Image (tube, rainbow, N blue to C red):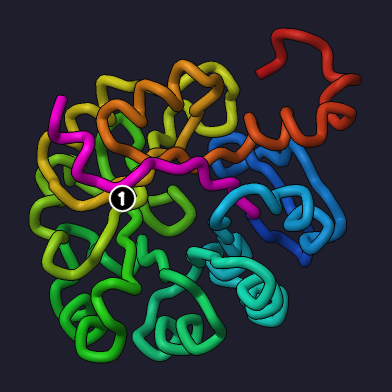
Amino acid sequence: SSLGRSFGSPVIIPCIDLMGRKVVQLVQGRDKALELPDPFAVLEKFEQYPQIQVIDLDGAMGREPQADIVRELCKRKPCRVGGGIRTVERAVQVVEDGALKIIVSSAAFTSHGIHEEFLRALAGQVPRDKVMIGVDCLGDRVAIHGWKKILPLASRDVIPRLEPYCSEFLCTYIDAEGKLQGTDLGWFRKLRSVTKLPVTAAGGITNEEEIQALEEIGMNAALGMSIYRKIFPELFAERPGGKG
């Protein structure tokens, strides 16, 4: 459709998820499938990509954030940064630490709706073009706090209401996350129909065909497990087939 062409050229964005000062890949946000000791060595492997998505999982889970690693990654490469950005002060700090954009997820919601008060306060301190809102869904219900709390909110209902507060969305299809079994393109198409803002798709994106299909609807693709499998094939060589 002509719609897809107005979003700028879609890009592949590799993910660096930090936990315990290492790079990890989790399946469904829980089970560790991969651990690499040096975030900066991983960053070097991604040099051909224009930007990186950095998620501080310790911050997201309410533990001590890894601000020093995030700051250094941002110095070396344009990074969109999320994980535990739950106060305006923290958001301002991450921007000052060099983030290209910040990703606000859990803090954008209350237990029953959109956290307008927080988002208005954020808008007063951080320019809209620096803010992405993460809408992570399990069974099409918004999930927050490390995906442990599921809200009675559907993605398509909240996205239009969040538009005034951000310049882009990061939408994760949790049901497929980390499984390397493909994603739900139909779900992403529905999301595309409710917003004109750029959307980065995440969660289970496994092959070139899916990336191509997302590109055709004008979405970027954030890749975790599938890009690690491509760039560090030796880490996966020992795995028995079929255990996803």
Quadrant showing the N terminus: top left
Q: Quadrant of residue 72?
A: bottom right
Q: Residues within 10 Å of mark 1 (few under 14, many from 20)?
A: many
Residue at image position (38%, 39%) is 201
Q: Is residue 21 left or right of residue 238?
A: left
Q: Is residue 170 left or right of residue 194?
A: right
Q: Is residue 237 left or right of residue 216?
A: right
Position in image of residue 139 (x %, y %): 30, 30
The answer to if 8 sits in the magenta stretch is yes
Position in image of residue 138 (x %, y %): 35, 35
Q: Residue furthest top?
A: 242
Mark 1, secondary structure of its residue: strand
40 and 142: which is toward the camera? 40
Residue 150 visible somewhere in the drawing? no
Residue at image position (63%, 30%) is 226
Instruction: Name which residue type carries label 1.
Output: Val
Residue at image position (23%, 66%) is 166
Q: Is residue 67 above or below residue 110?
A: below
Position in image of residue 168 (x %, y %): 28, 57
Residue identified by numbered label 1: 135
Number of labelled discs? 1
The answer to if 64 sits in the magenta stretch is no
Position in image of residue 108 (x %, y %): 27, 66
Q: Is residue 227 above or below residue 199?
A: above
92 and 209: which is toward the camera? 209
Residue range in magenta is 1-16
Q: Quadrant of residue 120?
A: bottom left
Residue at image position (59%, 22%) is 180
Quadrant showing the C terminus: top right
